[in-house]
Image (cartoon, rainbow, N blue to C red):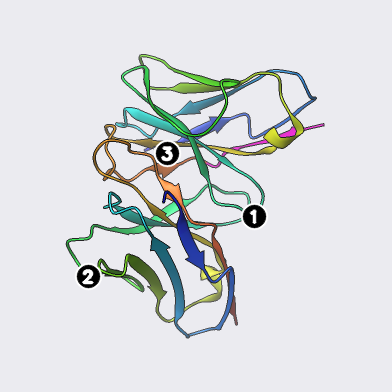
């Protein structure tokens, strides 16, 4: 039973560029959440997708956008990259958009901005 | 009010000892509290979670203690092993309305052999 898979594992970009990160949820899960984890910090919630719609959003600018596909996979897009966007981006999946559903995380995409 | 405060920042324990990590919250809307373990280069892995209708939950060597009136909860790792050396995060979430997890800042645990 495959867990949450994310691609790519590492990515290097320069300021001003755009990036797309991808996530396949755990089998049977229908909800995907994205988090940003800066070095030495806890994950910070970016947004959550359920039924192909953004349901919740954290304190991130509109440069961060996403999408969920009919097969429940998801993409995170970041435009106009800044140095401060360098972080580990984590995808978590769960069954239905509910607070008491355990979220299962992938191993993340390490994004470095030069 | 959205913060979850976690302590200590780092912890060193002898093999076989008890590791204790504490978290505190202010938002009374939080009513689901998971703990995650993260190894370097890996994503967080769910260890154990608790709802506030119970004061303690145990799974193997891991126990969550919950004090609703104090708005505090803690993770106890019994018989700590070198393989438990990792970073531990507490989190909190409401179960209605907004469903995002709010994470603590993490505790780096080192268990000495």
- B97 or B112, which lies in front? B97
Does A110 lie within the magenta span?
yes
Q: Are marks 3 and 2 on the same chain?
A: no
Residue drawn at point x = 44 percent, y = 82 percent: B18
Residue A5 percent coordinates (x, y): 49, 33
Q: Which mark is residue B55?
A: 2
Residue furthest out toward the top: A70
Residue B16 percent coordinates (x, y): 47, 85
Residue B68: name its quadrant: bottom left
Residue B111 percent coordinates (x, y): 57, 77
Q: Chain of mark 2?
A: B
The answer to whether residue B59 of the structure is visible from this angle is no
**Lower sequence index among marks 1 and 3:** 3
Gap between marks 1 and 2 measured at Cα = 30 Å
Q: Are marks 1 and 2 on the same chain?
A: no
The answer to whether residue B19 of the structure is visible from this angle is yes
Q: Chain of mark 1?
A: A
Q: Which residues are magenta?
A: A107-114
Residue B64 percent coordinates (x, y): 32, 68
- In the image, residue B72 sits, relative to residue A108, either above or below, namely below
Residue drawn at point x = 55 percent, y = 42 percent: A107
- B79 or B18, which lies in front? B18
Residue drawn at point x = 64 percent, y = 55 percent: A40
Q: Which residue is mark 3?
A: A3
Proximity of marks 1 and 3: CB atoms separated by less than 8 Å:
no
């Amino acid at each position: 039973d495959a867990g949450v898979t994310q691609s790519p594992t590492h990515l290097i970009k320069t300021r001003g560029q755009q990036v797309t990160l991808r996530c396949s949820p755990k089998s049977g899960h229908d909800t995907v959440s994205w988090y940003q984890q800066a070095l030495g910090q806890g994950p910070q919630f970016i947004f959550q997708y359920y039924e192909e719609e953004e349901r919740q959003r954290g304190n991130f600018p509109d440069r961060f956008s996403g999408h969920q596909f009919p097969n429940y996979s998801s993409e995170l897009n970041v435009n106009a990259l800044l140095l401060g966007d360098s972080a580990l981006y984590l995808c978590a999946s769960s069954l239905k958009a509910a607070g008491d559903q355990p979220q299962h995380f992938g191993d993340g995409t390490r994004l470095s901005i030069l | 009010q959205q913060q979850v405060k976690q302590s200590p920042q780092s912890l060193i324990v002898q093999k076989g000892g008890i590791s204790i990590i504490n978290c505190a919250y202010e938002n009374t809307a939080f009513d689901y509290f998971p703990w995650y373990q993260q190894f370097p280069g890996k994503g967080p892995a769910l260890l154990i979670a608790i709802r506030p209708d119970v004061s303690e939950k145990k799974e193997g060597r891991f126990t969550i203690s919950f004090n609703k009136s104090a708005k505090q909860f803690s993770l106890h790792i019994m018989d700590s092993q070198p393989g438990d050396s990792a970073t531990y995060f507490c989190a909190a979430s409401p179960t209605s309305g907004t469903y995002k997890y709010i994470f603590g800042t993490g505790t780096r645990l080192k268990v000495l052999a």
